[in-house]
Amino acid sequence: MTQNQSTTLRTHLCGVLRAGDAGTTVRLCGWVGRRREHGEHLAFVDLRDHSGIIQCVIDNSVDVRSEWVIAVTGTVRPRPDGTVNPGLDTGEIEIGDCTVEVLNEAEPPPFPVDDRTDADEPVRLRYRYVDLRRPRMQRNLRLRARVNAAIRAAMDRQGFCEVETPLLWAPTPEGSREFSVPARLHHGSFYALPQSPQLAKQLLMVGGVDRYYQIARCLRDEDLRADRQFEFTQLDMEASFATQDDVMGFVTEAVLNAAEAATGERPPDIARMTWADALDRYGTDKPDLRFAMELVDLTAAFADTGVKAFAAPVVKAIGVPGGASFTRSRLDQLTEQAKRAGASGLAWFRVTAGPALEGPLDRFLSESERGRVLEKTGAGEGDLILAVADVYRTACTVLGMLRNALGSPPVGQGPHRYVWVTDFPMFDGVDASGNPQAAHHPFTMPYAEDLPLLDSDPAAVRSQAYDLVLNGWELGSGSVRIHRSDIQSKVFATLGITDADAEARFGFLLGAFRYGAPPHAGFAFGIDRLAAILAGEENIREVIAYPKTQSGADPLTGAPSPLPAATLAELGIRVVVPPGP
Ligand code: ASP
């Protein structure tokens, strides 16, 4: 913050003055923080603006109170010996000889404006304009602004053209529930708020834009949680005549540039891992690389086992450092967690001196089985070994869930570990009619060599899709798109989307593809998530000026709220479920 932020009403910001400014006459504007009476005639007032706090020594007859808006004219001077506050950037100085002008009085704030506030979130959101004055929120919003600026600069440098796309549009196939907006001029018809600019950006490629980006608002009517809001912001991009490697390069540049702008340090280049490897080693497609505890395969160790619990297609395990001290009830809870996640059970062994294994199953293990369990997991005395015997996918995902539960630091803490996850399966699970579901979206290009498998073994088809993961959070996804209508029809057929369906839902896109679609690929990553982690926050609401609560409400405005009858009539809408009590 080196720019001169003086205006007609102020000469300086509060937080930028230092000992070297002593003797300067300044006029500062801001909010009254703490006030402390000092002797018979004087009072100390902390004057606050977004840049920080400075102490002003005022005549105690002046009536200024918490959160009043004032202008102070005075002289910068060193604080008297012994009163320097090393905890404050301006702690060596104060403003003396002050004249105070009250610009606006204020009601007492609903909670103290400092970072130690323990106000509940609904109260913070109800009075967000007060909450935003807190240093933490100012820091977060400004960090986010730097992230945005750095992303724009990086995209610009790489030849991308910023294009805005419509918010009132047609449904986008990203797999989430959509928000609908009634069309006043077309009663009974609705716009969809886009889940992403996916279709618009692909059309831009047909339109010859070549390299598009947008800091785009996306809307998805999904249940809210720490990393999810109805509306969120993505860096959305698409490039023509580009491969997966090209796109990963463009995005890496934007993300690393943003990280550097936020933290002052450019992270190292981003490592890559295939989806299959991520599942195998971390039990998830969102591996948190801040800690080890990798999954190991014990299937061979138990190949000839006589222990029924281990007679399964696959046995996998993790070592939990220091976990031998877990109580029996904690271990029972973990077993319950594993079962809820789909495992038939959870085997555990404490590693005791020797090292030896201790647990409900240890006495059934052969000597060689014990040896191989210890060797494979690398566990030592004081550790815990958790093993799941099941089909491969279940063994991996259950242990991945336990690994995160036991090892993950809070998402915003510790190092920032980025990783690209590549080669996702094309399909993931089946829908209600038994058709495979697109793992990314239906416009994702399979690997050319896997195309024949679309008929014979869809589950084995890999797609040219890639995710960017940071500290166990999915930052974003992208893919090479299908630009040829024969492949698109084939994929639609596998997904159970008939030609008529496809025509009705995305006819405009398929139509456009008949007019010269270049090969293209793209990506989008969540700026809320990136900014939250870079700001050290656990919840994206801390980097959003006006977020909604978990139940989708906005305590500040009262939204959502019923509409007056006249508005409903104008929109041609009749509400059949009356509002609740
Ligand atoms: N539209 C996708 C998403 O929002 C990203 C992409 O494929 O570009 O996740």
Image: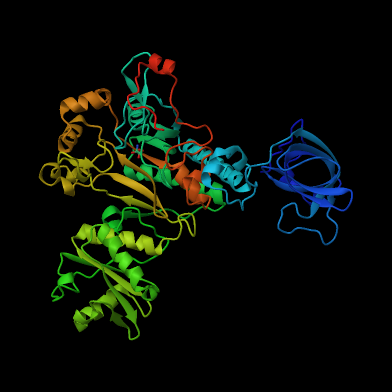
Whole-percent x and y of residue 273?
A: 32, 55
- The foreground one among 9 and 553 is 553
Name the side, left or right, on which 307 lies relative to 105: left
Name the side, left or right, on which 415 lies relative to 279: right
Please determine whether, in this image, residue 364 is positioned above or below residue 568.
Answer: below
Whole-percent x and y of residue 557?
A: 52, 32
Q: Residue drawn 45% across and 60% down?
A: 409
Q: Is residue 373 visible?
A: yes
Q: Residue drawn 78% across and 34% down?
A: 102
Q: Residue drawn 18% across and 60% down?
A: 391
- The foreground one among 525 and 514 is 525
Total number of numbered labels? 0
Whole-percent x and y of residue 8?
A: 76, 30
- The foreground one among 11 and 261 is 11
- Quadrant of image for the N terminus: top right
Please determine whether, in this image, residue 262 is positioned above or below residue 71.
Answer: below
Q: Quadrant of residue 160?
A: top left
Whole-percent x and y of residue 418?
A: 42, 53
Ligand 1, seen in the image, is in the quarter at: top left
Residue found farthest to the bottom: 354
Name the side, left or right, on which 419 lies relative to 149: left
Q: Residue drawn 22% across and 82% down?
A: 363
Q: Is residue 280 visible?
A: no
